[in-house]
């Protein structure tokens, strides 16, 4: 199993104020640079950064290509992932995406992971005029053609349902030929299976338990072997899931340092993605953090605080997306002592998970605590998993992929 | 072996098999039309699915409403009458949309041992 960091660039407003500190956005951008530089030094495999627009407090990461470009010059080995690029053409013209991905691949000496997706929030869809009912079709058409633009010389042109362009040679070409590994954001089980059918990796947002993941992994690889119709020119087999990270000397200290990280992450995500609240957000005026802190105790109990896993299973929502939010807020994830987190992660490893991606920067967590967690994880937990990845997981993967007739390009 | 082969009901399996063939041929529209028909047939065969609720926040929602709303849209009001209807808002569907409907329909059918 490999490990990565995941960034939304969260920035809660002050509880008692109407606006952020004037230096706050600069500060979190530079903190992320420091955190990823450290992660690279201690052996993390991936960083994934989202593209979101207008989701104040929840995500201030609207131009990940710039952050990843900066990181390409400050890091040596870590893979630089878009987690994800919004590919419906109204967000990003397909040729511009191909150009940016290729340029980043050259700058980073071939370290790009091309994550793709659609987004689902009212603020973003309505902000860019994207039809909610067609966004998946837009994603598919644009992502396929972006791969073609990187792979083909010249790109022969395209007349499609959502965009068209004449013959052009889209340059530069990426270092990773024909194109970097492709991923798709998957918040529902169906999308992970669509990913398998299209030969791309699934970047899961479901906060699945290790046991659920085992079933999903088996099915994903079976579909990939037996029913794949590749979207790109190479396939990228892989499943990744998210978990929250905070390490400390004691469980209590880890929970204290975790602060409102997972709770606010989940609350603000639910706030923007629920049409009832997301569509009523007052741009520049709402204070989501205050709303979170002031919400009724029962509502906060649903979204914040930690419980034993047995209770979690008794009370969690049945609806898949709601369940993911609930788990993001409540499941202890990778929060605790080194020993507890190591045992927790072994359960995912036993189910053959390819990549586990940590949300460390979230809510009002402190930079110094995130740095300490990254360093301790890299030095005290990561090495044994790295060894087993090379000796055990690679063998398992090659067995799963035996007989696959399509060319594979994957960093896993 | 495609996973719809595990569906026991012959008629339902046949409908989904037809959709699967269309999906594999890149004919998303044909696949989604067949899958919509299959889902409605599944709701007829297993009427308990119509009343099934899943927890959501502090309340719950009808499980049937988890059917993806990607252009083959389940009419909410039709659920109340006990005669569910799916409205196809266009002819053309992408392959990824058809795959999404396929996964949802087959998984639901297998969950209830149809």
Image (cartoon, coloured by chain):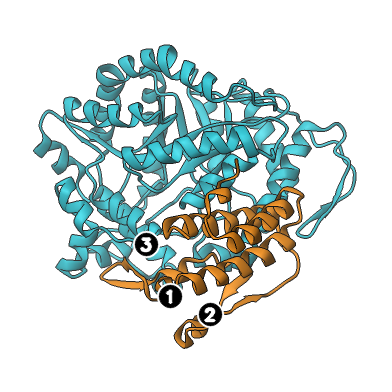
Chain colours: A cyan, B orange
The residue to which callout 1 is attached is B50
Are discs 3 and 1 less than 8 Å apart at CB?
no
Chain bearing mark 3: A
Earlier in the chain: of badge 2 and badge 1, it is 1
Relative horizontal placement of residue A76, taking residue A182 as reference (left or right): left
Give residue B84's mark: 2
Image: A290 above or below A111: below
Kindly indicate the quadrant of the structure image that contains residue A31. Answer: top left
Q: Secondary structure at mark 3?
A: loop
Q: Could you say where residue A172 lies in the image, as x and y percent from the top left?
A: 76, 30
Circle 3 packing at 10 Å, graded few (<14), some (14-19), many (20+), is some
Q: Is label 3 on the same chain as label 1? A: no
Relative horizontal placement of residue A34, taking residue A294 as reference (left or right): right
Residue drawn at (63%, 25%) of the image: A409
Chain bearing mark 1: B
Q: CA distance from mark 3 to mark 2?
A: 20 Å
Image: A28 above or below B111: above
Task: Give the mark toward the camera: 3 or 1.
Answer: 1
Task: Give the mark toward the camera: 3 or 2.
Answer: 2
The residue to which callout 3 is attached is A319
Task: Tell which of A392 and A103 is nearer to you.
Answer: A392
Relative horizontal placement of residue A145, taking residue A100 as reference (left or right): right
Residue drawn at (31%, 15%) of the image: A384
Are discs 2 and 1 less than 8 Å apart at CB?
yes
């Amino acid at each position: 199993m490999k490990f990565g960091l995941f960034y939304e660039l969260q920035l809660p407003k002050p509880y008692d104020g109407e606006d952020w500190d004037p230096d706050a956005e600069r500060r979190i951008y530079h903190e992320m640079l420091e955190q990823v530089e450290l992660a690279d030094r201690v052996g993390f495999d991936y960083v994934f950064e989202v593209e979101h627009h207008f989701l104040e407090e929840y995500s201030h990461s609207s131009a990940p290509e710039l952050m990843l470009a900066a990181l390409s010059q400050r890091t040596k080995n870590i893979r630089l992932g878009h987690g994800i690029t919004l590919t419906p053409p109204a967000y990003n013209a397909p040729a511009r995406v191909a150009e940016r991905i290729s340029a980043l691949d050259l700058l980073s000496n071939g370290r790009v992971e091309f994550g793709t997706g659609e987004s689902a929030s009212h603020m973003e869809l309505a902000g860019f005029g994207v039809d909610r009912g067609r966004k998946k079709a837009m994603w598919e058409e644009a992502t396929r053609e972006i791969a073609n633009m990187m792979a083909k010389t010249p790109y022969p042109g395209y007349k499609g349902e959502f965009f068209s362009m004449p013959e052009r040679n889209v340059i530069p070409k990426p270092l990773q030929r024909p194109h970097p590994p492709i991923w798709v954001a998957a918040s529902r089980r169906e999308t992970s299976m669509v990913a398998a059918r299209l030969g791309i990796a699934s970047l899961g947002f479901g906060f699945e338990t290790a046991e659920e993941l085992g079933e999903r992994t088996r099915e994903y690889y079976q579909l990939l072997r037996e029913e794949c119709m590749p979207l790109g020119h190479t396939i990228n087999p892989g499943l990744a899931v998210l978990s929250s990270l905070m390490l400390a000397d004691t469980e209590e200290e880890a929970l204290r340092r975790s602060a409102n990280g997972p709770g606010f992450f989940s609350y603000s995500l639910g706030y923007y993605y629920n049409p009832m609240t997301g569509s009523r957000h007052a741009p520049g005026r709402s204070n989501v953090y205050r709303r979170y802190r002031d919400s009724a105790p029962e509502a906060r109990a649903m979204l914040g605080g930690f419980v034993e896993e047995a209770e979690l299973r008794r009370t969690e929502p049945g609806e898949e997306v709601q369940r993911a939010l609930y788990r993001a807020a409540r499941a202890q994830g990778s929060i605790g002592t080194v020993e507890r987190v190591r045992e927790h992660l072994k359960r995912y490893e036993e189910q053959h998970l390819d990549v586990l991606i940590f949300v460390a920067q979230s809510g009002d967590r402190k930079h110094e605590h995130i740095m300490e967690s990254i360093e301790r994880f890299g030095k005290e937990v990561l090495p044994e998993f790295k060894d087993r990845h090379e000796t055990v997981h690679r063998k398992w993967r090659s067995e799963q992929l035996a007989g696959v007739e399509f060319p594979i390009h994957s960093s896993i | 072996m495609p996973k719809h082969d595990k569906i026991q009901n012959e008629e339902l399996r046949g409908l989904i098999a037809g959709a699967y063939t269309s999906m594999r041929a890149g004919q998303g529209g044909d696949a989604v039309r067949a899958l919509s028909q299959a889902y409605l047939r599944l709701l007829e065969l297993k009427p308990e699915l119509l009343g099934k609720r899943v927890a959501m926040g502090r309340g719950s929602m009808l499980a049937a409403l988890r059917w993806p709303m990607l252009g083959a849209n389940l009419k909410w009001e039709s659920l109340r009458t006990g005669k569910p209807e799916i409205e196809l808002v266009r002819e053309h569907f992408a392959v990824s949309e058809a795959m999404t409907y396929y996964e949802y329909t087959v998984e639901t059918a297998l969950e209830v041992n149809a």
